[in-house]
Amino acid sequence: MNMQTSAPPLSSHISDREENAWKRAVWRILPILMISYIFAYLDRINVGIAKLQMSSDLAFSETVYGLGAGIFFIGFFFFQVPSNIVLQRFGARRLLAALLACWAVIAPLTALVTTPFQFYAVRFMLGLTESGFYPGVILYLSFWFPSYRRGKMFALFAAAVPLSGLLGGPISGWIMDHFHNMHGLAGWKWLFILQGTPSLLVGLLVLKMLPDRINDAKWLSVEEKAIMNARVQEDAVEDSPHEQASLGAVLRNGKLWLLTLIYFCLIAGFYTVSFWLPTLVRNAGVEDVFTVGMLTAIPYAAAIVTMIVASRSADKHRERRWHLAVIAIMSGVGMVISALYADNLWIAMFGLTLGAAGGLSTLPLFWSLPTAFLGGTMAAVGIALINSFGNLAGFVAPYLMGFLSDLTHSTLAGMLIISCTLFVGAAAIFLIPGRVVNR
């Protein structure tokens, strides 16, 4: 494995040209990916604010909601490994565009559900159509950027999550309030229709504008392509012949399963915030759905700042473990505060802001770990495996929250358990040798 931590020195003239090429790549690629992920994430978690009307209209219990929100990740589980193999062989442009078009059809169908089974079925199908997107983008960015630039790229891409919440919370609240009973449809139905269909247009944008590899970019010169390809190749981790030939090599890699455990713990906190934030704000004493949407924007705004600052610091100091662990612990502490002071709006909002800023910032920091020592087929399959199994926490955590809320008539027990899960994940990070990931 190549443990080189920096590119070899270049002349000032070539170095300036190289830096301009990297900046151009960022501006050409990241906005398209971020727009795509904003809609993907919005379609995934807008059920959280829809719940404020939907559950009463359809007489869904907290357990039904938690199971429906989480069953998305059962569908999410199945397609990630094959989709990353397809992406590696045939390119990102067509695969990502197809996924966007598929979930643009599925997401609005949530407006038609009337029974728990229909709710579960639509959420399962939505998870299936979205499953290849996130691991596909992680792999795609590893084709374009060396490891010492990748942390910032992951952070910029992942900033679509809090940006989606920052914009989506107020917009969702406004849609549910303004469109309620328009043409005989409830506000939550309009929410799924209006936020689901635009992904089809985004898919066409991806198909037209996203280059598969550096050599496919028409906006780079031949010299710039050569420099960038050299940087990616000299930093790359190559498969051994055994790893290329056998899926068993992936499944026997102990580091991958440790990373999967860590990711599971982090995802539990991530999606507890995503799916339960509107409910937690309402439980603190806010009844108006538009106000709930506005208040949910505050934790997401804090998450954008935390995500960018922490990832830049990790790249600058080439230190991954402590950055990720501290952010995870911050999220757990925030959740404990919000749980203990759930009836005090301002203290609860402080805790939720701390919890969201930490929880949503763990993902870009985490993905700097496996991409630092995986390459080739091992990267394609390993990233998808981590994402597939780790995201099962997205099923377990919302369901657990719903079940315990029905059982205890409080979110306290669920929030405390999820907080402890984050603390376990933070401790497990240090089982990974720093020399492997601090690049």
Image (spheres, rainbow, N blue to C red):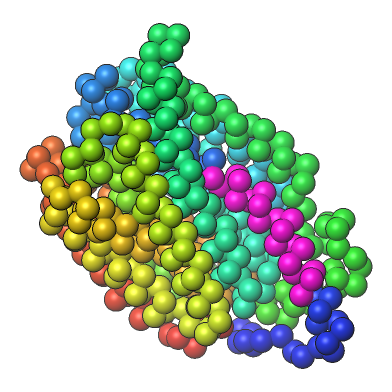
| Residue drawn at x 77%, y 53% as measured from the top left | 211
Task: Verify whether residue 227 appears in magenta.
Answer: no
| Residue 20 falls inside the magenta stretch | yes
Q: Which residues are magenta?
A: 19-38
Q: Residue at x 35, y 74 (%)?
A: 325
Dominant secondary structure (helix, strand or loop) of the stretch shown in magenta = helix
Position of the N terminus by quadrant: bottom right
On the rendered structure, is 401 left or right of 178? left
Q: Tell me which residue sits at (86%, 71%) in the image.
A: 224
Horizontal and vertical percent position of residue 296:
35, 45
Residue 78: percent from the left, percent from the top? Answer: 47, 45
Which percent across, then down, holds residue 303?
A: 42, 59
Asked if residue 68 shows in the view, the reply is no
Looking at the image, residue 394 lies above or below residue 424: above
- Going 32% across and 51% down the picture, which residue do you hit? 273
Residue 59 visible in rendering: yes
> Position of 231 compared to 70: left or right?
right
| 308 vs 428: above or below | above
Check the picture and name the quadrant holding the C terminus: bottom right
Residue placed furthest toward the left: 408
Above or below, comparing residue 219 to residue 238 in the picture: above
How many numbered dots are placed on residues in this image?
0
Depth check: 297 or 323 in front? Answer: 297
Q: Is residue 57 left or right of residue 408?
A: right
Residue 382 lies, in percent from the top left, at 52, 64
Query: In the depicted view, which residue is nearer to us: 16 or 46?
Result: 16
Describe residue 101's horizontal placement relative to residue 310 as left or right: right
